[in-house]
Image (spheres, rainbow, N blue to C red):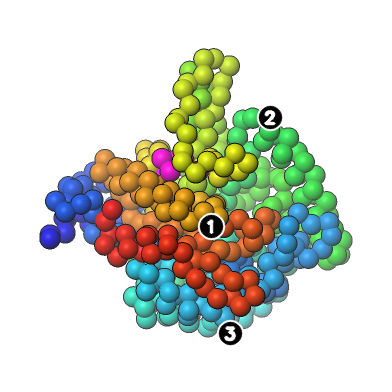
Amino acid sequence: MNNPDFSISRRALLAGAAGMTFAAAVNTTQAADGKRFPKGFRWGVATAGHQIEGNNVNSDFWLLENILPTCFKERSGDACDSYHRYQEDIALLAQLGFNTYRFSLEWSRIEPSRGFVSQAELDYYKRVIACCRDHGVDPAVTFLHAAAPRWFAQAGGWLNPEAPALFANFCSLAAKALAPDMAFAFTINEPQVAKTFRAIPNQGAAAYFAKRDEAERAAHAAAARATASDRYITLNYPDIDGMTPLLLSGHEQAFAAIKAENTKLPVGVTLNIIDFQPGSEDSSYLDVRKSAYGAWLEAVRRSGDFVGVQIYRQLAVPGGGKPLPAPPPMPYVDAKNMIANMAQPGALRNGVEYIYEQTHKPIFVTENGIETDNDEQRVWYVGQALAGLYESIEKGVPVIGYTHWSLLDNFEWEQGYKPKFGLVAVDRSSFQRTPKPSAHYLGDIARRSAI
Ligand code: BGC
């Protein structure tokens, strides 16, 4: 059977970077033999260093996990031991059918104390990238996925006016060593996730954040005392409005620093998107979207060859007026798991279309997935979400790839190891990897590039 000409070329990608529209660059003709994704589409899985590598002992979060009071239900510890098992992970994902691996560098390994750059750790990440290439897998690399070095937090983290330059300096040295072999680079993972969640306009969320903020302040104060610092600031510190201008500048400086080392490398930021929908006729959902993404949409219009979008949830924003009918209930609803129940697969299509409409940049779905212990639900979710994504592509949205969160059941930050997002289960004592049916289901879609 013929492959339709559905490709997104590098020229098209760079046309997007130059702000041109993609209607002409993407041929959305449907194949006779099914729903084939564009030629060159990236199919992958996503992970992040701190969540899988293990023993990220010089990171800011490591300390927060290991002191009292802490907001972490458990510590990351050995995580999935991917630091030592990356070859097994990469071989597995390639064998499953994926052509792209999104993972992150750990800044605190490469620059464990300010100004000291570990050549040995740069060489380590070179080997990870080379291993991807040996398996025919494109390395898609995040420079900062939440965890930063401890010294950076002790110096005030993203509330320190020096933060953008410190981060850009790291990006520059890491890109000099590693960018020549990368396929994609992402500056900062979800720098606005706290804004998105705080934009949720209901009292339950407000009460939740008030309680959580207090606990976070206490944990950060304990870390400051433990390190004899004036303040200890991580991305979990509850002052996202204070951090945002510095994060924006950090992204823009990092974008320029990475580009300076490899002008051909597509670089962008990844954003956390909730599909805010109207819950009533007078819903202010558009204002909610604006407050969740506002400044970042402007930033990606200025500096980004594409936008990384990370979409898990949909939320109807109520107003005082007549409520709109609720969407039909999803299968597999779990009355107790509010977060899982926000995982409407249609959110992916809506979020992708909204971000494209706002930015006119190519879209890379750098995360999408579902927290569930029931792998049948994951299979259902992935099928539905990808059907929606295909609709967006048919409408002319230039989607260049999809990396599923996540390859492995991993360390889900403050929630510890209980939430299961992985296509592959990991035994917590032996670290043995066991692919779930969803890994084969999505791997098969990836191999055929069709649904
Ligand atoms: C983050 C990941 C996280 C995932 C699932 C995303 O917001 O980038 O680090 O594990 O959501 O919770």
Q: What residue type is labelled 3?
A: Ala
Q: Tell me the SS state at disc 1.
A: loop
Side (left or right) of 391 relative to 93:
left
Of the pair 116 and 385, the residue shown nearer to us: 385
- The residue labelled by disc 2 is 203
Q: Give the percent coordinates (x, y) of residue 331.
A: 46, 41
- Extent of the magenta region: 343-348
Rounded to the nearest whole Å, what is the CA distance between mark 1 and mark 2? 28 Å
Label at residue 120: 3
Q: Give the percent coordinates (x, y) of residue 13.
A: 31, 56
Identify the residue at horizontal 64%, vertical 30% (top origin): 202
Side (left or right) of 364 relative to 409:
left
Q: Badge 2: few (under 14), some or many (20 or more) residues near its Cα, within 10 Å?
A: few
Q: Tell me the SS state at disc 3.
A: helix
Rounded to the nearest whole Å, what is the CA distance between mark 3 and mark 1? 31 Å
Question: Where the N terminus falls, by quadrant?
Answer: bottom left
Which comes before the other along the chain, label 3 or label 2? Answer: 3
Q: Give the percent coordinates (x, y) of residue 262.
A: 40, 69
Which-is-in-front pick, marks 3 and 2? 2
Q: Does the magenta stretch include residue 345?
A: yes
Label at residue 421: 1
